[in-house]
Image: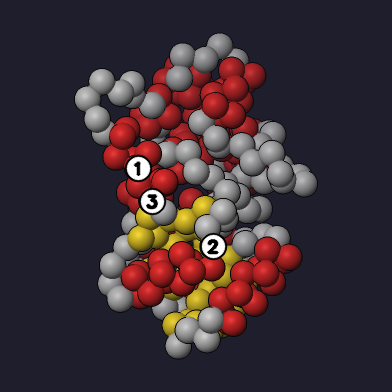
């Protein structure tokens, strides 16, 4: 049995995925985490074969959780399972070291296929996502301005796009408000934005905002 740590902030989503996966009789859900921080802690305790990780979650979110987990253990296998299909997130997360990327539109058979391939040492990217990434590399395609952002700048932009203040961002990232303000200024400069409204518009265009959330939460 493949041991899975399921990480998603929505209990109903976790319940649905758990039932579908356990019905397959190929995997065992050994733990459920509702945030990036909880996932990091549970990885140490449960040592799962694979982590199924959402992106939009409270706290540090999936992107930063993925980075921290792989920084501690580069061999840990992570499959991203999210609503985000735009190339901004797949590119970031695959560069960090995630072994798979699925959207929540996939069916259970594709999810099982991805889990098996990653568990056997391979990788799996949903075909539609893989095509987008491949097309983005073709000559003549315009550079995505968000790709110019550093890891921390990207994270701060995500938090801004979800309505967090400088103080809230500084608390979550363990930075001073002054440092967060500096990152905001860098974002305006790199993205040729005039104000925070422009930043949010860019975030929306890049698919960085999850409208289905009941409350703002950073990624």
Alpha-carbon span between mark 1 and mark 2: 18 Å
Label 1: few (<14), some (14–19) or many (≥20) C-alpha neighbours in 10 Å = few
Alpha-carbon span between mark 1 and mark 3: 6 Å
- State whether residue 45 is above or below residue 211: below
Question: Hey, which quadrant is residue 36 in on the image?
Answer: bottom right
Q: Position of residue 23 (x, y in %)?
A: 59, 82
- The residue drawn where x is 41% and y is 54% is 126
Task: Kindly state the secondary structure of the residue where label 3 is placed.
Answer: helix
Q: Position of residue 105 (x, y in %)?
A: 56, 53
- State whether residue 15 is above or below residue 218: below
Query: Given the current orientation, which residue lies at the most extreme right position?
Result: 214
- State whether residue 168 is above or below residue 2: above
Q: How is the image coloured?
A: secondary structure
Label 2: few (<14), some (14–19) or many (≥20) C-alpha neighbours in 10 Å = few
Quadrant of image for the N terminus: bottom left
Label 3: few (<14), some (14–19) or many (≥20) C-alpha neighbours in 10 Å = few
Alpha-carbon span between mark 3 and mark 2: 13 Å
The reply to whether the C-beta atoms of the residues labelled 3 and 2 are less than 8 Å apart is no
| Residue 151 visible in the displayed image | no
- The residue drawn where x is 29% and y is 40% is 134
Mark 1 or 2, nearer chain start: 2
The reply to whether the C-beta atoms of the residues labelled 1 and 3 are less than 8 Å apart is yes
Q: Name the residue tied to disc 3.
A: 127
Q: Where is residue 165 in the image (x, y as percent from the top left)?
A: 68, 33
Whether residue 159 sits left or right of residue 137 in the image: it is right
Q: Name the residue tied to disc 1.
A: 131
Q: Name the residue tied to disc 2.
A: 107
């Amino acid at each position: 049995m493949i041991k899975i740590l399921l990480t998603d902030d929505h209990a109903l989503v976790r319940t649905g995925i758990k039932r579908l996966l356990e019905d397959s009789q190929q995997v065992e859900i050994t733990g459920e985490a509702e945030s990036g921080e909880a996932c990091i802690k549970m990885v140490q305790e449960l040592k799962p074969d694979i982590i199924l990780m959402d992106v939009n979650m409270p706290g540090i979110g999936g992107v930063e959780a993925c980075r921290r987990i792989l920084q501690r253990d580069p061999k840990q296998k992570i499959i991203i399972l999210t609503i985000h299909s735009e190339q901004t997130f797949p590119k970031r997360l695959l560069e960090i070291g995630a072994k798979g990327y699925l959207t929540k539109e996939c069916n259970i058979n594709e999810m099982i296929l991805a889990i098996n391939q990653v568990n056997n040492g391979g990788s799996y990217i949903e075909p539609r996502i893989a095509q987008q990434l491949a097309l983005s590399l073709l000559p003549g395609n315009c550079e995505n301005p968000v790709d110019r952002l550093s890891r921390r700048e990207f994270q701060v932009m995500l938090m801004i796009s979800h309505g967090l203040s400088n103080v809230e961002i500084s608390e979550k990232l363990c930075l001073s408000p002054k440092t967060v303000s500096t990152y905001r200024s860098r974002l305006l400069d790199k993205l040729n934005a005039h104000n925070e409204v422009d930043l949010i518009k860019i975030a929306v265009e890049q698919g960085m905002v999850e409208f289905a959330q009941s409350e703002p939460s950073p990624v």
